Image: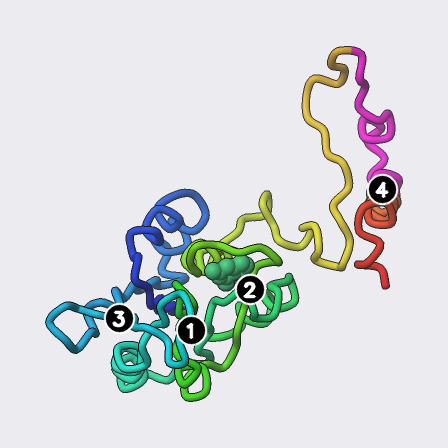
Amino acid sequence: MRIDIITVLPELLTSPFEASILKRAIEKGLVEIHLHNLRDYASNKYKQVDDYQFGGGAGMVMMVEPIDKCISGLKAERDYDEVIYMTPDGKTLNQGMANELSLKKNLIILCGHYKGVDQRVRDLFVTREISIGDYVLSGGELAAAIVCDAVIRLLPGVLNDETSALTDTFQDNLLAPPVYTRPAEYKGLEVPKILLSGNLPKIEKWREEQALERTKERRPDLLE
Ligand code: 6GU
């Protein structure tokens, strides 16, 4: 998979890919991340990428021309499955969406800033608009990093058995059951006996029950 990220703040998108699972996925050649500084595509000598909005109102709008130049340049090099625009008025990210995106080959992710992008960017180029939740971030960069993390960890070969995505919370619309490690007793709190029993079918059944219980309690909406 190849992901091209268009941003005015590329420095916000370096460290997420320099540690742990995402770093290893890149090193293994399972994903390529390419950052593009939108300012490099500005036309005028001030490297301007935003401007006042027509009709007035507070806040700048990201201009269509630099974004067009960047996206069109990329599309001239290869085909893209999706052009994703990160915006708080997009569809909220969920596991199903991450699963779907993990099957794609080439993605462009455009990070919004200020009051967002000129509507014509959306009309001309964007195939999918994603939000990461109902709160406002100062830009789409951290949201883009979250989408990348959720998608890349699903690519075949990225996770080992130990960190397998199959038992994740949300994988079958259930929260994960409680987990324990040593010691078997801590400050009077004991690990459930069943987990020490060695009876694998019984343990599996217990985990399923706990997952269902937790989901009913905390996220009944997932069961609807
Ligand atoms: Cl994608 N961008 C911004 N600026 N704020 C957000 C968001 C995205 N998702 C939730 N809040």
In the rendered image, the vertical position of residue 159 relative to residue 31, given as above or below: above
| Disc on the earlier residue, 3 or 1 | 3
Marks 4 and 3, how far apart at CA:
51 Å
Kind of residue at badge 4: Gln
In the picture, the disc for residue 131 is 2
**Res 100 quadrant in image:** bottom right
Give SS at disc 3. loop
Marks 2 and 3, how far apart at CA:
22 Å
Mark toward the viewer: 3 or 1:
3
Q: Position of residue 149 (x, y in %)?
A: 49, 55
Kind of residue at badge 2: Ser
| Disc on the earlier residue, 4 or 3 | 3
**How would you classify the magenta stretch by its main secondary structure?**
helix
Marks 1 and 4, how far apart at CA:
37 Å
**Res 53 quadrant in image:** bottom left
- State the residue position of label 1: 107
Mark toward the viewer: 2 or 3:
3
Q: Position of residue 81 (x, y in %)?
A: 46, 81
